[in-house]
Amino acid sequence: MTSLPLVTVFGSLHYDIAVMGPSRPRKGETVTGTSWHPKSGGKGGNQAVSAARTGVATSMIGAVADDDFGRFLLANLKRKGVDHHFVRRDASQSTGMSVAIFDEEGDYGAVIVSGSNLILGEADVNAAHELLSRTTLLVLQNEIPDAANVVGARAVKQAGGRVLLNAAPARALSIDIQPLIDILVVNAIEAEMLAGVPVVETLEGALEAARKLAKIYPEVVVTAGGSGVAYVGRSGEEIAIEAVKVIVESTHGAGDEFIGVLAAEIASGRTMKNALQKANAAAATLVGTPEADRI
């Protein structure tokens, strides 16, 4: 493997439409919004951009359609310094997209349509074999098929790299992917599903959930929103870091910002404590930045 750190993200790309309003509509309700704008999204794409912003070499493996949405997403990856040579263009599909509705407090609800993200699999891993053989850390999420995550993780592990899974959105993890995970990153909801016990979104609650999950996975990170982030390693190391206090403008993308910076710092050889502190601070900065001001 190369001595230079390389983060590869194998995951989703979505064309996002962000809608601003006074509140999120209830069932059967129509709300008059104030503005809307398109943006590049998908957990995979967001995390790749976040990692590349740190200056660490970052590549993206994904899929878009041969349409305006797909071209928009590819242009964004190029502009943000992400190698996108292994993003497949498939004319038979529609590009993944989402609509997110924000309220005045910066909270949101979203609907995603996966589209071309669902075709990812072994063919994409085979095409990117040389890239994956050089990858220091592979970042995966749950917005692409589990089978795709499995073949990607196997390829990187066989080459001596490591695998970080951001198990979001929440879903059961297959027995095939579990032994391939080096670092599991989840929020309180995802931790509760995987640990099988209620998780309180506090720093102590996150730490307790991480302890339970560390019996299965070598390293576990549990984020607890405005409370902070907890880490437990199978070696017994425990870290708890309080959240950086900011005035919340929008929580959208905070988790992806955290993951991208965390991955870049780990790939660069930073200690887990330093990596978590850097990622925690980056997420806080994003939360305190209005949607319209994010570039």
Image (spheres, grey):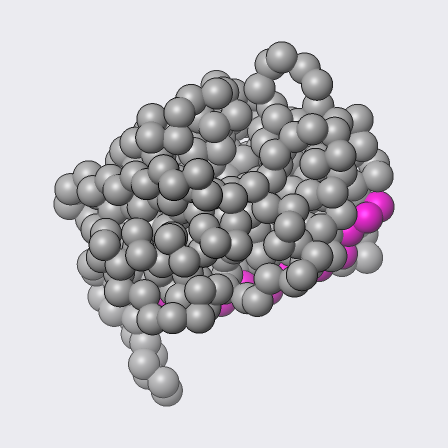
Residue sitting at x 26%, y 42%: 240
Which residue: 41% across, 58% down? 212
Seen in the image, is 149 located left or right of residue 273? right
* Tally of numbered tags: 0
Q: Relative to 226, does residue 131 appear above or below in the rendering?
A: above
Q: Is residue 160 above or below residue 212?
A: above
Residue, x 15% and y 42% (percent of image)? 245
User: Can residue 219 be seen from the camera position used here?
Assistant: yes
Left or right side of 26 for 150: right
Identified at 68% across, 15% down, the residue is 2
**Residue 241 locus on image (x, y percent):** 24, 40
Give yes or no for residue 295 being in the magenta stretch. no
Residue 158 x %, y %: 75, 34
> Where is residue 128 shown, x and y percent of the image?
78, 34
In this view, which residue lies farthest toward the front? 235
Magenta stretch, residue numbers: 109-123
Q: Quadrant of the C terminus?
A: top left
Quarter occupied by residue 20: bottom left
Q: Please name whichever residue, 9 or 292, is drawn nearer the observer in this view of the structure.
A: 9
x and y percent of residue 72 in the render? 59, 41
Q: Is residue 118 magenta?
A: yes
The residue furthest top is 3
Q: Image quadrant for the N terminus?
A: top right
Residue 88 appears anywhere in the view: no
> Viewer-proximal residue, 25 or 222?
222
